[in-house]
Amino acid sequence: MNISNKTYKELSIPYFKETFDCIDDVMSENETPYYLIGASAIALQLLKKGIKPNRGTKDIDFAIMIPNMAAFENITVGLNKKGFHKVKAPWTFYSNSFNVAIDLLPFGEIEEQHTDNFNERYTDLHVLGFSEVLEAAVPIPIEEKIANIPTLEGMVILKLIAWSDRPEERENDLADILRIIQHYYDLEFDEIVEFHYDTIPDENFDQLIIAAEVLGRKSKLLINKSKLLSELIEGILTSDLKEVSKSEIAKD
């Protein structure tokens, strides 16, 4: 299914088109690669198969590949001209006209120990995993524009890391991961049958278990690109699943 005008309505995100156009203009002017991530990216991936999003959001997240903080400031100037201004966290911008907040999460050469250092108050924006996941990003056309977004297995990795960083504030991350698992079998049926047939049991067939196993396999290919990323994901899972009865990941 091609992404068309209809997609903007189906995304259920107010002023998504206007916001995306502003970002595209500013990033093009600054020759900055950018990627749509978060719930909006998941929604676009699912829309390829005609699956409508189950929740709208006024927050739209982007990852931007930049070399230094000077490049970020240039982008800030461009966004200010478009009516987006910093609020609270220095990577968050808000438009009064659109009533939309966007997060711009820098990665690439700007990273110091896989962390972006903005100022004395905000020094803990962790971006470990961005480079590995976004290296495998896929382009999806939106009318005359192209949105580069993570694969679904890449989104699982980013969502898991984001949740572990601030679990008390990121309850939607685990719900988004579950939504991916719920639809993954149908979305990737042909690939599962051709390349992961061994995950399909003769008895006790369960699409969710098959989907989770295949997602795990494909996620591991990305995770294994970085020892630090691999150790981080292993640590998150080990810590949360230590007592399954208290696990946030494993709970119904």
Image (tube, rainbow, N blue to C red):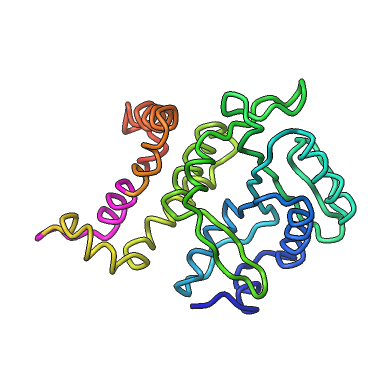
Q: Dividing the picture into quarters, in which one does residue 70 lie?
A: top right
| Numbered marks: total | 0
> Going 74% across and 57% down the picture, which residue do you hit?
28
Horizontal side, residue 114 vs residue 191: left or right = right
Q: Position of residue 199 (x, y in %)?
A: 19, 55
Examine the rendering and report whether any part of residue 246 can be seen. no
231 in relation to 142, above or below: above
- Is 204 magenta? The answer is yes
Q: Residue at x 86, y 60 (%)?
A: 97
Quadrant of the rendered structure where residue 110 is? top right
Residue, far top: 120
Q: Is residue 140 visible?
A: yes
Magenta segment main secondary structure: helix
Q: Residue at x 39, y 27 (%)?
A: 231
- Image position of 150 (left or right of 59): left
Residue 120 locus on image (x, y percent): 76, 20
Taking the spot 47% from the left edge, 51% from the top edge, the residue there is: 136
Question: Which quadrant of the figure has residue 114?
Answer: top right
Q: Magenta segment range? A: 202-217
Give whichever of 33, 50 is nearer the camera. Answer: 33
Q: Residue furthest left?
A: 202
Residue 81 counted in the magenta span: no
The x and y percentages for residue 12 are 64, 67
